[in-house]
Amino acid sequence: SAIVEIKSGMRSEDICILIENAGLIDNAVSFNAYLIRNGFAEQLRSGKFELNSAMTFEEIAKMLTW
């Protein structure tokens, strides 16, 4: 697992790259497309989140949104 810090004003693309660079997902582009397609991209919040690589896109998205 890893702690990911999302700062206020970060775009969904930046957040996806951050999560990919932490080794938690394989493909930032695919995850960002998932966030947009499912309405999560506009609900992302800032803060520190503990995520792990066993989590699904949906589980990660639900942790990062309101």
Image (spheres, grey):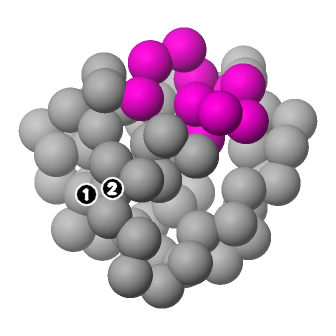
Around disc 1, counting alpha carbons within 10 Å, would you say few (fewer than 14), some (14 to 19), or many (20 or more)?
many
Image-based side of 54 in relation to 37, left or right = right
Image-based side of 57 in relation to 13, left or right = right
Magenta highlight: main SS: loop
Image-based side of 14 in relation to 35, left or right = right
Amino acid beneath label 2: Ser
Which of the 4 quarters of the picture holds residue 3?
bottom right
Mark 1 sits on what residue? Answer: 41
Earlier-in-chain disc, 2 versus 1 = 2
Q: Residue at 21% across / 68% down in the picture?
A: 42
Q: Position of residue 51 (x, y in %)?
A: 74, 44
Mark 2 sits on what residue? Answer: 12
Image position of 54 with respect to 8: above or below: above
Q: Residue at 58% across / 23% down in the picture?
A: 25
Asked whether the residues under the numbered discs 2 and 1 touch, taking CB atoms below 8 Å apart as contact, a structural biologist would say: yes
Q: Residue at 49% across / 40% down in the picture?
A: 17
Identify the image quadrant of the N terminus: top right
Q: Position of residue 35 (x, y in %)?
A: 27, 43
Residue 4 included in the magenta stretch of the image:
no
Q: Position of residue 21 (x, y in %)?
A: 65, 33
Residue 27 included in the magenta stretch of the image:
yes
Q: What stretch is highlighted in magenta?
A: 19-28
Secondary structure beneath dot 1 equals: helix
Q: Which residue lies furthest to the bottom in this view?
A: 8
Which label number is shown at residue 17?
Answer: none
Image position of 53 with respect to 63: above or below: above
